[in-house]
Image (cartoon, helix red, strand yellow):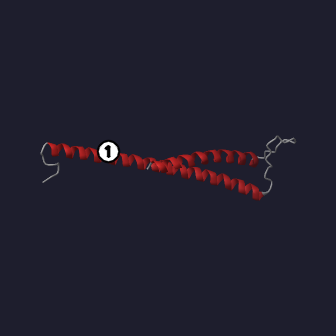
Amino acid sequence: MALPSRVYVGVFVFGLIASIVTLTYTALFLSGYRPPPEPPLIYFEPPDEPAKQFFLVLSSLLCVGFTVFAWRRLVAGARRDVETRRRRAELAREQQRYRRTEQENKRPPGYT
């Protein structure tokens, strides 16, 4: 039960990092940013063609969608784990009550 939650935590963190980087890059170039005439060591060529801009927007949307999917699965897994723990605790209490009545040679509750 703990394995899917751990997997989705990793996927969520990866998606969050990828989304932050991709959305920042997309916002920079779609808002009209142009690098200085003397480019720094790391140089990103601005996407001038509409196809490249569309690809940049699409990749940003996919990163955000990936992150949202991982978050929703993580929350669903946490809710499922809480429900499982609640049912196990209820079953343990019922078994303990049954053992106690067996030890006292009484009929279990609900026995007719």
Task: Give the vertical position of 97 relative to 111 (above or below).
Answer: above
Secondary structure at numbered mark 1: helix
User: Residue at left 68%, top 56%?
Assistant: 58
User: Residue at left 63%, top 44%?
Assistant: 17
Quarter of the image where the C terminus is located: bottom left
Q: Is residue 31 left or right of residue 93?
A: right
Q: Is residue 40 left or right of residue 100?
A: right
User: Residue flagged by tag 1: what amino acid is it?
Assistant: Ala
Quick one: which residue is furthest to the bottom in this view? 51
Q: Is residue 62 left or right of residue 101?
A: right
Q: Residue 106: percent from the left, percent from the top?
A: 12, 46
Q: Residues within 10 Å of mark 1 (few under 14, many from 20)?
A: few
Q: Residue 100: percent from the left, percent from the top?
A: 19, 42
User: Residue at left 79%, top 49%?
Assistant: 46
Q: Is residue 26 left or right of residue 66?
A: right
Q: Nearer the viewer, residue 82 or 88?
A: 88
The residue that label 1 is drawn on is 89
Q: Residue 96: percent from the left, percent from the top?
A: 24, 43
Quick one: which residue is furthest to the front in this view? 103
Task: Give the vertical position of 101 relative to 54 (above or below).
Answer: above
User: Residue at left 53%, top 49%?
Assistant: 8
Quick one: which residue is furthest to the right in this view? 37
